[in-house]
Amino acid sequence: MQSLNQWKADEYDNKLAFVSGYGKNLISWLQPKKGEYILDLGCGTGDLTHEISLCEVEIVGIDASSDMIRRARDKYPHLEFKAGDGHYFETNRLFDAIFSNAALHWMRDPELVVSSIWNALKPGGRFVAEFGGKGNVDIIVHALEEVIERSTGMDASARNPWYFPTIGEYSSLLEKQGFMVRQAYHYDRPTKLSDGDRGIEGWLSQFGGDYFQGLDTKQIQEICLETSKRVVPQLWKEDAIYADYKRLRVEAVKPVI
Ligand code: BEZ
């Protein structure tokens, strides 16, 4: 259920700082209030957990990758971080709010995740999240799957690790659980990649692990290079490659019964 991607905390911090950079804007939907108890679900290396903590809240970050958690603890030793799977996390103390940026698309059983979130929130508690929505990175994914299928003969789409729902699908899922969906927004967010014209290779090396299981280094390099050649002409704008990100942003509340 959980992706097989191997997270590399170093690369995440050095080359993918845009992930938390863009996520800062999501904090304006969370509106953390002094003294609140908040969970950052899928916290990565903890940058947004730290940003939210500046609002004088009590915060806990959880992430499925122990490498990310180790790095988060090194960077922010005064904050609490735990390794944990978003499908099954539990808490003894209920949260005022649960926040999640760029993580939920890695969790393939959204019903389980939404149910864990529901169980961990106080009545009246809010859930604020942003992640990949329907159509996210379509250009990259289609090219990658085609290149893998041509070079290995396998059905690459069966290895797609991501959950990118429509606004309707995800809102219905939340409502079925009992949430009141206050706001939901599906939008294009072209995302500038670092590394100049090698940006796609870097992106695939950080995020494409599920597709590359069982392939050798040479095969992986060739697949990344060929995918890059196919998509760069479509994604290059003026000064860089802009990946075709589409975000789904939601705010939902657990009603007080
Ligand atoms: C995203 O943030 O949309 C994303 C990141 C890595 C892989 C797929 C999507």
Image (spheres, rainbow, N blue to C red):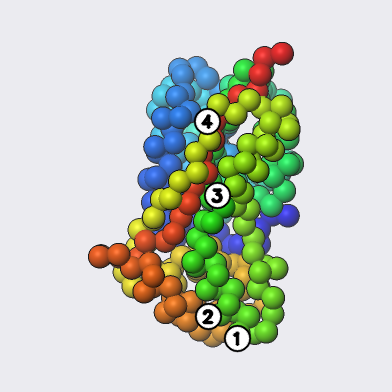
Dividing the picture into quadrants, the one containing residue 5 is: bottom right
Residue 20 spot, x, y in % from top left: 42, 45
Quarter of the picture holding the N terminus: bottom right
Res 183 label = 4
Label 1 environment density (alpha carbons within 10 Å; few <14, some 14–19, many ≥20)? few
Residues at marks 1 and 2 touching, judged by CB atoms closer than 8 Å: yes
Labels 3 and 1: the sequence-earlier one: 3
Q: Residue furthest left?
A: 238
Q: Which residue is mark 1?
A: 151
Q: Residue at x 66, y 69 (%)?
A: 157
Please say whether residue 55 is visible from this viewpoint: yes
- The residue mark sitting in front, 4 or 2, is 4
In the figure, is residue 248 to the left or right of 83? left
Labels 4 and 1: the sequence-earlier one: 1
Quarter of the picture holding the C terminus: top right
Q: Residue at x 61, y 49 (%)?
A: 165
| Label 2 SS | helix
In the figure, is residue 50 to the left or right of 192? right
Label 2 environment density (alpha carbons within 10 Å; few <14, some 14–19, many ≥20)? many
